Amino acid sequence: MSVRDKSDPRLRDMAALDALFLEAAETERKLPPAIRKQKMSSWVEYVKTWESYGWHDFTPSLPKATPEQVTRFEMAMDLLNDTNMDADDKRLIWAVAHSAAFNERGPRWSALARKMRVDHRTVRRKYTDALVRLYYKL
């Protein structure tokens, strides 16, 4: 299937494009790091009493990405890289997707606006405009 195939249900409208990039950002966070941390030889700090079991709180890690998620991640990257989009639009789309990844309330428009030094409504409008431009370039 071609990247530019509009019959694909993931490319039928701007909401589908938005969902595709959001899933791609979540998938990127699920992938293993490019460079593994080096393990040094040292002793772990621990408490030497019988009541110390469960001393550290359990923090679950993210589940691994499935092959279908990786395929859609590659599709989203191809959409950003193969179309002749402006670099600022690419950065904005990816920043919005990352700010919304694993966030129930959606993108953090205010945080993005502070980074871009504009109003949060301007960031939303620029994001919508970038998705519209991407949709019509497909």
Image (tube, rainbow, N blue to C red):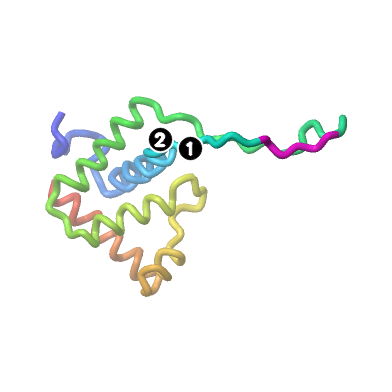
Please give left or right for residue 15 compared with residue 26 in the image.
Answer: left
Q: Amino acid under label 1?
A: Gln
What secondary structure predominates along the stretch shown in magenta?
A: loop
Q: Quadrant of the N terminus?
A: top left
Query: Residue at position x 43%, y 41% from top?
Result: 29
User: Within the image, what quadrant is residue 88 found in?
Assistant: bottom left
Q: SS of the residue at dot 2?
A: loop
Please give left or right for residue 46 compared with residue 22 in the image.
Answer: right
User: Within the image, what quadrant is residue 42 found in?
Assistant: top right
Q: Which residues are magenta?
A: 43-48
Query: Where in the figure is residue 134, as x and y percent of width and height?
Result: 19, 52
Please check the rendered image and state whether residue 114 is part of the magenta-colored stretch, yes or no.
no
Q: As rendered, which of 66 and 51 lies closer to the eye?
A: 51
Q: Earlier in the sequence, mark 2 or mark 1?
A: 2
In the picture, the disc for residue 56 is none
Query: Where in the figure is residue 104, as x and y percent of width and height?
Result: 51, 48
Q: Which residue is mark 2?
A: 31
Whether residue 60 is situated above or below residue 138 in the rendered picture: above
Please give left or right for residue 35 compared with residue 12 in the image.
Answer: right
Query: Residue at position x 30%, y 60% from top?
Result: 127
Q: Amino acid under label 2?
A: Leu
Marks 2 and 1 close (CB-CB < 8 Å) = no
Disc 1 packing (10 Å; few <14; some 14–19; many ≥20): few
Q: SS of the residue at dot 1?
A: loop
Query: Residue at position x 80%, y 37% from top?
Result: 47
Please give left or right for residue 13 compared with residue 63 in the image.
Answer: left
Mark 2 and mark 1: Cα distance apart in space: 18 Å
User: Within the image, what quadrant is residue 114 found in?
Assistant: bottom left
Query: Residue at position x 26%, y 41% from top?
Result: 76
Query: Where in the figure is residue 60, as x and y percent of width and height?
Result: 60, 35
Q: Which residue is mark 1?
A: 38
Disc 2 packing (10 Å; few <14; some 14–19; many ≥20): some
